[in-house]
Image (tube, rainbow, N blue to C red):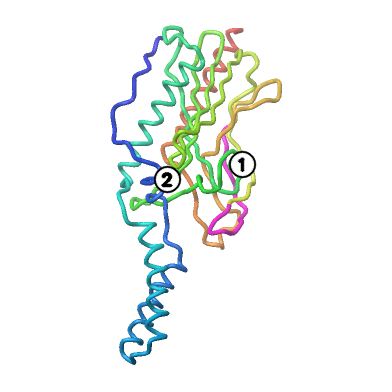
Amino acid sequence: MATQTQAPASTRQFSEAEMKRYFSTVPSAAIVAAIIGVLLLFIGFSTQAQAFLASGLVLLLIGGGIISAKLIGPKPTDQQYDAWLNAQAQRVRVKAVEKLGLDPRQLTAEPLVIHGFVLSGTKDSISYRADEIRSKKGTDGKWRFSVNIYTYFFPEEHHLAAFVGDVNALNQSSHNEKTEEYFYRDVVGATTGDEQDTILYKKKQYQYRIQRFSLRIASGDSIGVSVNATPLDNRQNLPNYTIPDSGIDQTVANLRALLRSKKQGGV
């Protein structure tokens, strides 16, 4: 079954500065400083106390400056970020075909994909700078991530080609990539399972249960990606991180069916 890899549709591009504003949150200390500054200015004007006026002005300038730097300026909406990310995912797919040297006419099925993410403090985060890893809960209640991982599988007659590539909204020129090609007989299985890992949330470490996909190879190697993260202790009122359209269930089912058919056929 031949498949064609289409070039990604044109969509609006956003700079790293705009993406940084999208993922930015205002530090509570800046808000407190601005509020105290306003109160001190009010007291200073009421009492004509120069010390209150000076202190209030300084605090207001500091707090207001931080808030302005974080929030003022163009940035994408949730929907615009989704459209941008989808376009980047298509570019990853095009690059995967090029890097693997695939002939689309030799593919026996449509490529399979799993969309994962990276969270601050986890084992996967060591490949990125701390300031590159951000997450944001949109107005629609869905989580969005600054570092997204796409794992593509390309079925051929005797091989399964795999490509892992990331999309980094806050460092768009940097890319971590991995290419592999396996004989079907060497693939042990496609599995999902939970691992325990540490997540850095609001500058504190918490234990999370991470759901990971793994394509396991007879040599002991594997290709994996995180798709869900839930706190071990639900009493701490911590967020659950997930991507509703990760594609993991369909991809795992299709991979298992593909592996069964190939192994039964003696490939």
- Name the spot of residue 231 as percent of width and height, x first: 57, 53
Asked which secondary structure carries label 2, the reply is strand
Q: Nearer the viewer, residue 165 or 254?
A: 165
- Whether tag 2 and tag 1 are in contact, CB under 8 A, the answer is no
Q: Quadrant of residue 53?
A: bottom left
Q: Nearer the viewer, residue 116 or 84?
A: 84
Q: Residues within 10 Å of mark 1 (few under 14, many from 20)?
A: few
The residue labelled by disc 2 is 144
Q: Residue at x 50, y 31 (%)?
A: 175
Position of the C terminus by quadrant: top right
* Highlighted magenta segment, given as a residue range: 200-213
Q: Residue at x 65, y 16 (%)?
A: 186
Asked if residue 150 is positioned above or below residue 27 in the image, the reply reads above
| Residue kind at label 1, given as amino acid type | Ile
Q: Is residue 108 covered in magenta?
A: no
Q: Decide whether the magenta segment is chiefly helix, strand or loop.
A: strand
Label 2, label 1: how far apart the Cα atoms are: 20 Å
| Residue kind at label 2, given as amino acid type | Arg
Asked which secondary structure carries label 1, the reply is helix
The residue labelled by disc 1 is 126
Asked if residue 68 is positioned above or below residue 101 in the image, the reply reads below
